[in-house]
């Protein structure tokens, strides 16, 4: 009897392991098919409006649409810091809620640079010992002198969290970590360590760059760049 239960338990456990191994793959395939379906419908409507019948050749036209969109976005990304982009944005800034929506969307932009770059940081823990992993969405000084805003997100659904004003001496920059790495860490609920996600060995806290040192190095690099530009 015990042997029979053991076989059934072993069988059930293997089924569950197979299911949870398959679920992420199935979810990705489902999302890709859903996106493809949406692109197919949109592309058909666009070309039908222009007078083209692409029925039966939608895959080729979808691929062409994606290429055109990618090139367009690349060009926009290239000119985003030009005066034309600033004038266009200034016009839209007059529309209610535009600035708020822009800030919310920019939270997920891991390609930001300068003072708006998203930093993954370690801060002194809120217990007696240890550290917490958080995010700095900008490196602008807080209203409290020598303090900076660090956000600790919730896990596994990081759509909420807490904001803290932390003294710069208690903030250490994890330089090779990105917003996306931190998101993966949160979604895993700690099943994957940040070291595992970054594919690096665990480090002592004094091996990380203190925030003040990181900011000073960026200021020096910016100053050197301005000097070279003036020459």
Image (spheres, rainbow, N blue to C red):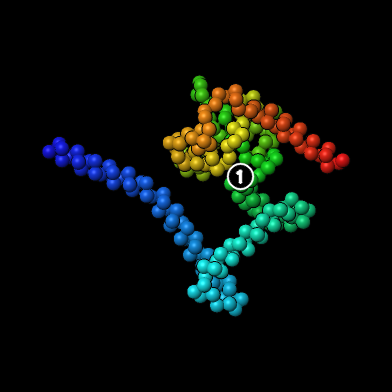
How far across and how far down the image is residue 4, in percent? 15, 40
Determine the image quadrant of residue 147: top right
| SS state under label 1 | loop
Q: Please tell me which residue is depicted at 37% across the width and 46% down the height of the picture.
A: 21
Q: Is residue 50 above or below residue 128?
A: below
Left or right side of 227 for 180: left
The quarter of the picture where the C terminus appears is top right
Residue that carries the numbered disc 1 in the rendered image: 110
Residue closer to the observer: 155 or 98: 155
The answer to whether residue 96 is visible is no
What residue appears at the point 52 percent right and 41 percent down from the top-left corner? 183
Write the residue at 50% across / 37% down: 197
Percent across and percent down for residue 3 are 15, 37
Side (left or right) of 186 relative to 52: left
Q: Is residue 6 above or below residue 15?
A: above
Q: Judge from the rendering whether residue 133 lies leftward or rightward of residue 144; answer left or right.
A: left
Is residue 170 shown to the viewer in this render? yes
Looking at the picture, does residue 91 appear above or below residue 117?
below
In the image, 96 versus 10, the foreground residue is 10
Quadrant in which residue 94 is drawn: bottom right
Q: Position of residue 126 (x, y in %)?
A: 52, 26
Which residue lies most toward the right here? 231
């Amino acid at each position: 009897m015990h042997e029979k239960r053991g076989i059934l338990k072993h069988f059930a456990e293997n089924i569950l392991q197979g299911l949870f191994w398959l679920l992420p793959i199935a979810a990705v395939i489902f999302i890709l098919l859903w996106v493809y379906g949406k692109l197919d419908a949109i592309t058909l409507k666009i070309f039908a409006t222009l007078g083209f019948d692409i029925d039966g050749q939608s895959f080729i036209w979808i691929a062409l649409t994606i290429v055109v969109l990618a090139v367009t976005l690349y060009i926009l990304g290239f000119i985003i810091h030009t005066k034309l982009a600033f004038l266009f944005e200034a016009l839209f800034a007059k529309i209610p809620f535009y600035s708020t929506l822009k800030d919310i969307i920019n939270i997920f932009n891991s390609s930001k640079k300068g003072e708006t770059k998203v930093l993954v940081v370690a801060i002194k823990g809120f217990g007696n010992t240890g550290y917490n992993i958080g995010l700095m969405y900008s490196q602008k000084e807080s209203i409290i002198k020598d303090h900076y805003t660090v956000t600790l997100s919730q896990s596994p659904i990081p759509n909420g969290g807490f904001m803290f004003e932390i003294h710069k001496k208690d903030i250490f920059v994890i330089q090779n970590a990105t917003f996306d790495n931190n998101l993966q860490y949160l979604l895993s609920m700690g099943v994957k360590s940040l070291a595992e996600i970054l594919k690096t060995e665990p480090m002592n806290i004094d091996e990380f760059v203190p925030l003040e040192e990181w900011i000073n190095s960026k200021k020096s690099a910016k100053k050197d760049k301005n000097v070279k530009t003036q020459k």
